[in-house]
Amino acid sequence: MSAQVAAQTTFDAWVASKGAAVGPPGTTSVLTPLAARELWDREAQGADVLDDASVQRLDAVIRADVKRATAFQALLRGRVDRRKAPAATPSASRNELAPFNPTPEAAVAKALELLDVGEGDVVYDVGCGDGRFVVAAARRG
């Protein structure tokens, strides 16, 4: 009877497996080499190699972070839709501190989808205006 040996992955092999996802700042890469190393070190805790389960956990962290980053990008892209929306009333004429500039429904829906907001999640919207983001989140879960 032979014992099955778990596969071991080095940092260099793991980075190579990511292809263009790891690259210098200012490129379309998801991680810089430094960020990849920091994630690796957090999981490896001083080890030179990781087993398959640890590599899978590391990859899951990256997927979750990319998902969050994509959601924020979707919100920022919603600014394009705002240009098509009716203009905000100047705050001085309404005796308010800031103008009401609502997030387009498409941006709200996309952000909630990408963040995978569901029952049991807590959602904060610091500048909530009319609360459309938190209301949409509550309706999802």
Image (spheres, rainbow, N blue to C red):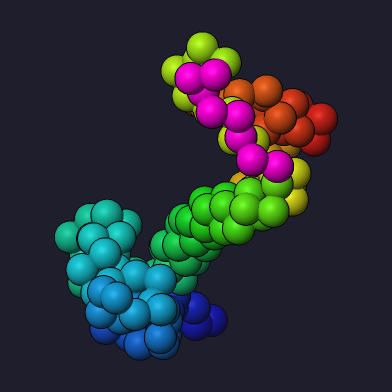
Q: Which residue lies at the image location 34% right of the left edge and 70% below the top edge?
A: 31
Q: Which residues are magenta?
A: 86-93
Give the residue at x 52% y 57%. Answer: 73
Please say whether residue 32 is visible from this viewpoint: yes
Q: Where in the figure is residue 102, as x and y percent of width and height?
A: 64, 36
Q: Which residue is outermost to the front?
A: 93
With 62 as the anchor, is 24 left or right in this view? left
Task: State the residue at coordinates (80%, 35%).
Answer: 140
Q: Residue 90 appears at what percent x and percent y?
A: 54, 28
Indicate whether residue 91 is drawn in magenta.
Answer: yes
Q: Is residue 112 above or below residue 83?
A: above
128 is higher (above) or lower (below) than 25? above
| Magenta stretch, main secondary structure class | loop
Q: Nearer the viewer, residue 90 or 119?
A: 90
83 in relation to 134, above or below = below
Quarter of the picture containing the C terminus is: top right
Task: Tell me if residue 113 can be seen.
Answer: no
Quadrant in the rendering for residue 55: bottom left
Q: Position of residue 5 (x, y in %)?
A: 43, 78
Where on the picture, by quarter, is residue 10? bottom left
Q: Kindly give the residue lying farthest to the right in the view shown.
A: 139
Q: Between 22 and 109, which is closer to the camera in this rendering?
A: 109
User: Where residue 54 sits: x, y (%)?
Assistant: 42, 63
Residue furthest to the top:
95
